[in-house]
Amino acid sequence: MPEKTAHTEKNKLGLLTSTSLIVGNMIGAGIFLAPAALSSFGSVSLLGWVISATGCFFLVKVFSNLSRIVPNVTGGPYAYTRRGFGDYMGFSIAWGYYIAVACANAAITVGFVSALSTFIPLLSTSTLAAASTGLASIWLLTWINNAGVRVSGRVQLITTILKLIPLIAVAFCGLFFIRFDNFPPFNNSNMSLFEVISQTVTFTMFAFVGIESATVPADKVADPQRTIPRATMLGLIIVTIVYVLGTVSVMGIIPPAQLQNSLTPFADAAVIMWGPHARFLVSAGVAIAAFGALNGWILIQGQLPYAIAKDKLFPRVFGKENKKGVPYVGMFFSSILISIFMIMNYNKGLVDQFKFLVLLSTLSVLIPYLFSTASYFVLRTSKQLTKSEWAQCILLFTISFGYVFWAIASAGQKTIFYGFLLQMTGIPLYLWMKAKNENTAQGDL
């Protein structure tokens, strides 16, 4: 027993690796395309980044406070929601979050293979080669994560540093190449100012998904009550600087008509600054970004079913750990799910379904944020508070809840409807587990 305790204490994520988990999970391959997508809205999209970063600052405060109120508990948003609203709501949030992460991982894998095609052209012409490469990356990272959280943490730290190099290079060096007449009009759409801001906030909010990453494997984090709040805030600051300055630089370097049609805006900006060979640096950054994000999310996806199983709301087998303290059953099952979703993208008859699942997953990640914020209010106000503490609690809850609610409402009626249905699909499993637990309890009597 002492040997296991010593090993457990050694196998922890510190401040650097926790921060890299957050930054690595937020910065995937998608950010390399964001300036082109946002340019169609106009320069108002820069305001969208600022609003999203501000909203996420309050979300960070919520998750930081929750990590202190509910310390050393695996599961992040699931654990917080369960503590605030009971078993069913906790399970429902975990179910939607779990499926959402699997869909997102499949999309990240497709992005990784697409980025590699710059260096291996066969991947853009052969479906078999592309699908095989995607499967190989999923199972390679599953094997790495199965070696322990410290090993996957090191991989995350290295890939995060490598992916930041081209982004930071373009973001900061690009400021010296800006031409102000390249910036698109403030509102370049046919929508009202409120509508266009709402859409840009929703779009940019999705780029911050992953901010909760360090809270999910909380029991694998060294001194979580201090490390998680510091890592989360540090991660937000790093990502915000890269996102805002990167978008400003790319918009100021590339003419708007060219930018809107660009499939590789960061690479195009790098070519203007440093010549044609710079494209390969940015393409390598895209591949590393996707690979690192996939590594971090596979780590998260193994921890979530483990946490639910420990609370007897998921089959007991998902609570098993290997000698390294890794919940290997949940991790392998998750990777099988990711593999199935990814293969859908390479099957012509299933491409539309794959795209829909990815769209749906973005909403299913925002819902846990909403309930985590509500849980913070419930748990915080369950204790004796001074007038000043009450005021701070109400202010933090109001801004955070309102911000996430706004992002969800802007996702569109169809997405919200199917997101609700996705949450409902977990009800049979929940009822089965509750009935099984009740039968077990009666048998013990």
Image (cartoon, rainbow, N blue to C red):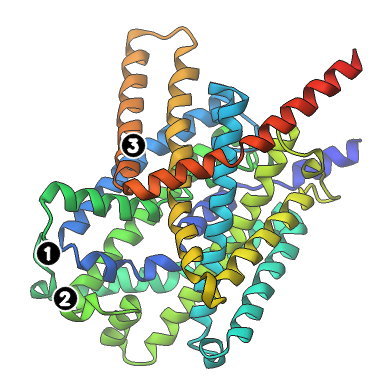
Q: Earlier in the sequence, mark 1 or mark 2?
A: 1
Residue at the extreme front: 349
Q: Nearer the viewer, residue 370 or 351?
A: 351
Q: Secondary structure at mark 2?
A: helix
Which residue is drawn at the image coordinates 74% and 37% (left, top)?
309
Image coordinates of residue 364 in percent, x first then y, are 48, 46
Residue at x 59% of width, y 61% of height? 156
Q: Earlier in the sequence, mark 3 or mark 1?
A: 1
Asked which quadrant contains residue 251, the reply is bottom left
Read off the residue under disc 1: 188
> Marks 1 and 2, Cα distance to the nearest angstrom?
10 Å
Circle 1: element type: loop
443 lies left or right of 134 = right
Measured from the top left, where is residue 249 in percent x and y? 24, 70
Disc nearer the start of the sequence (2/3): 2
Disc number placed over residue 256 in the picture, else none? 2
Establish if 384 lies above or below 180: above
Quadrant of the rendering where the C terminus is positioned: top right
Question: Label 3 is placed on what type of residue?
Answer: Phe
Marks 1/2 in contact by CB < 8 Å: the verdict is yes
Label 2 to label 3: alpha-carbon separation: 32 Å
| Amino acid under disc 2 | Pro
The mark closer to the camera, 1 or 2, is 1
Q: Amino acid at mark 1?
A: Asn
- Closer-to-camera residue (73/418): 418
